[in-house]
Amino acid sequence: MSSVLQTDERSAKDINDKGFDGNQHAELYVQLKQREHVWWQARQQLTLLKERQMFWFGDNSFMMWLLWQLVSYVIVAMVLMLLSKLLDISLPLWQYIGLFAIQTLIFIGMLYFKGRFANHLQSKINQADVLREELLNEMTILAADSLYRDVHAKAPISLRQIYEYYDGEFRLASLQRLLQEEVQAGRLILGQQLKVQTLPLELADDELKENASEIIYKSVL
């Protein structure tokens, strides 16, 4: 741990002496920041869609549909009782039965078209996934002429230092994901690997905050 801290201190001093070349790549960084914002939203939307898919169409989805149908019965019954008291109206039994029968038919129809609902949701997931990948590719192209050059020039450097010297304009999860592309290309070596790509962004950012100072990037260029 002491060696890591010493490396961080040396890297921090080197950055203070030389500084990031922000003016030279200002326009690229503006574009990168814009793409990162949209990418963040797209990935968050993808996570929400997958959670919704698991909730409604997962392994226990049929029991969930039945549970919500029972809940809807209770809600309708409570609303009818409340209206009866407020409006002093007494509906005959056959109307109550008819209302619940219609509700049951609607539920059966929803089950019948459940496959279509699932396909529609899967289509939205595919679209969000494609958008996320396209934005990541655009971010990688922009980073190649800006972020990557700065990181290689200042390496070895920690993820925390990169985040701080860009004044927190980029999220830790975004920086880590972009730098992972450079690691996979073999141009950076990562001292510590965290599996945060599959986590929801909020959790990924929290995970990285705790370990960002220990994640050291070393250049092989």
Image: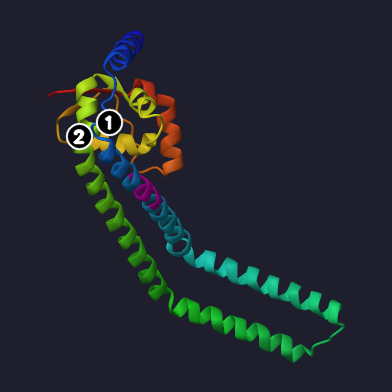
User: Where in the figure is residue 90, as x and y percent of width and height?
Assistant: 84, 86
Residues shaded magenta: 36-41
Instruction: Relative to 139, say whether 186 is above or below.
Output: above
Task: Name the residue type under label 1.
Answer: Asn
> Percent from the top left, x then y, of residue 161?
35, 22
Q: Which residue is mark 1?
A: 23
Structural distance between the alpha carbons of marks 2 and 1: 23 Å
**Residue 194 x, y percent position in the rendering:** 33, 31
Task: Answer left or right for 110 relative to 147.
Answer: right
Mark found first going from the N terminus, 2 or 1: 1
Q: Which residue is mark 2?
A: 182
Q: Quadrant of residue 58?
A: bottom left
Image position of 165 with respect to 80: above or below: above
Residue in view at x 23 percent, y 38 percent? 143
Rendered position, 66 above or below 30:
below
Q: In x, y percent, where is residue 66?
A: 56, 69
**Amino acid identity at mark 2:** Glu
The question of residue 140 being in magenta is answered with no
The answer to whether residue 41 is left or right of residue 131 is: right
